[in-house]
Amino acid sequence: MAAARAAAAEPRLGPVAEWGDIGPYRVLAALPAGAAADTSVRPLLAPAHAELARTAEVFLDCAGQAGRTAAALGIHRQTLYYRLARVEQLTGLDLDEGEGRLLLHMALKAARL
C-alpha cells in the first residue's frame, strides 16, 4: 500500500513501484498521515504558493545547484534566487543550512503522499 502511494505521488517511480525502489518515500509512507507535516512549511503548501513549492522541491532535487534548477524550471537564475528568498520568508527556514533543507525537502515530498 505504501509503495502504491509513493508511485502515485512520484511519476518517475512508474505506475507500480516495489517497496525497495521507493527510496526516501519508505520513511515518509511509513508515518501516519499528516505526521510529516511541519508548521514552518505549511504556508508554502497553500495553493497560492504552488509555484514556490515546486521551485523549492526542484531546487532540492537538484542538490541546490542553481544552474541545474533554473534550467529544469525554464527560468532565469535571478528569478530562482527571488523565489528561494520568498520560500525562506514564508517558512522561516534558512536554505543555507542542511537541516532546514532536509526539513523542507521531506515535508514537500510528504505533502504529495
Image: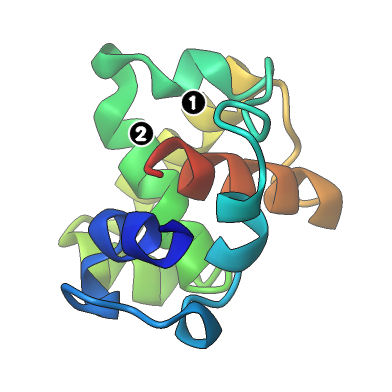
Question: Quarter holding the N terminus?
Answer: bottom left
Which mark is nearer the camera, 2 or 1?
Answer: 2
- Residue 75 place in picture, x, y as percent: 20, 55
Q: Amino acid at mark 1?
A: Arg
Q: Say few, some or many: other residues with alpha carbon within 10 Å of mark 2 (under 14 / 14 to 19 / 20 or more).
A: many
- Residue 23 place in picture, x, y as percent: 56, 77
Q: CA distance from mark 2 to mark 1?
A: 8 Å
Q: Amino acid at mark 2?
A: Leu
State left or right for residue 90 relative to residue 4: right
- Residue 80 place in picture, x, y as percent: 37, 49
Residue at (68% x, 24% y) in the render: 38
State left or right for residue 35 relative to residue 5: right
**Mark 2 sits on what residue?**
52
**Mark 1 sits on what residue?**
86
Picture quadrant of residue 50: top left
Q: Earlier in the sequence, mark 2 or mark 1?
A: 2
**In terms of secondary structure, where does tag 1 sit?**
helix
Image mark count: 2
State left or right for residue 78 relative to residue 95: left
Q: Say few, some or many: other residues with alpha carbon within 10 Å of mark 1 (under 14 / 14 to 19 / 20 or more).
A: some
- What mark, if any, has residue 2 been given in the picture? none
**In terms of secondary structure, where does tag 2 sit?**
helix
Residue at (77% x, 43% y) in the render: 100
The correct choice, above or below, for 82 with respect to 57 in the image is: above
Q: Nearer the viewer, residue 91 or 6?
A: 6
- Residue 110 place in picture, x, y as percent: 51, 43
Residue at (32% x, 21% y) in the render: 49
Q: Nearer the viewer, residue 81 or 103?
A: 103
| Farthest residue, direction front | 1
Q: Are marks 2 and 1 in contact (CB under 8 Å)?
A: yes
Residue at (63% x, 35% y) in the render: 32
